[in-house]
Amino acid sequence: MLEIKIFSEPLNIQSCIDWVMTDESGGIDVFIGTVRNATKGKKVVRLEFEAYETMAVNEMRRIAEDIVTKWPVHKILIHHRTGLLKVGEVPVVIAVSAAHRNAAFDACRYAIDTIKQTVPIWKKEVFEDGEEWVTPNP
């Protein structure tokens, strides 16, 4: 029902989708976070992600368990990367399956919004002319 993991290597989007698919699910919602090339008008060279891994996995699991109490979902997958990521790479994938699309959409949005606020994974943006730790705002 739940798959929560942190990886230091690239995430496999298709395997994430495959994992949440069930015959009972009429909808799968997938959030794929990608490293964009600019923030606030500054060119991004790369992002650096650090995590307190044990606590991060526990908190992501708590979020997934909370989702199960709020929406009728079938499966929830949350994968997050750590390390150095270049523009275009994927630091996070969230996939949720449910009988109906609204539950999948709502649960997926709740997951990413809550992860950004509560999970001890920190992001540093590295620019051409400096770097900055990012505060948890969407």
Image (cartoon, grey):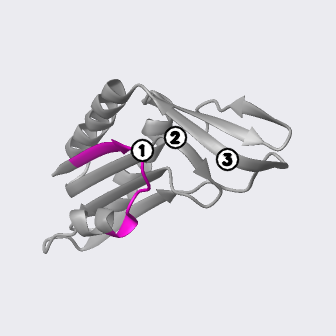
* Residue 95 horizontal side relative to residue 83, left or right: left
* Residue 112 horizontal side relative to residue 78, left or right: right
Q: Does residue 65 sit above or below 14 in this rendering?
A: above
Q: Which residues are magenta?
A: 3-14
**Dot 1 alpha-carbon crowd within 10 angstroms: few under 14, some 14 to 19, many 20 or more:** some
Residue 46: mark: 3
Which element is circle 1 on?
loop
Which element is circle 3 on?
strand
Q: Earlier in the sequence, mark 1 or mark 3?
A: 1
**Dot 2 alpha-carbon crowd within 10 angstroms: few under 14, some 14 to 19, many 20 or more:** some
* Residue 74 horizontal side relative to residue 127, left or right: left
Q: Position of residue 120 (x, y in %)?
A: 45, 27
Q: Are marks 1 and 2 in contact (CB under 8 Å)?
A: yes
Residue 83: mark: 2
Q: Nearer the viewer, residue 129 or 116?
A: 129
Q: Earlier in the sequence, mark 1 or mark 2?
A: 1
Q: Position of residue 104 (x, y in %)?
A: 32, 60
Q: Nearer the viewer, residue 67 or 10?
A: 10
* Quarter of the view holding residue 63: top left
Q: Position of residue 82 (x, y in %)?
A: 47, 40
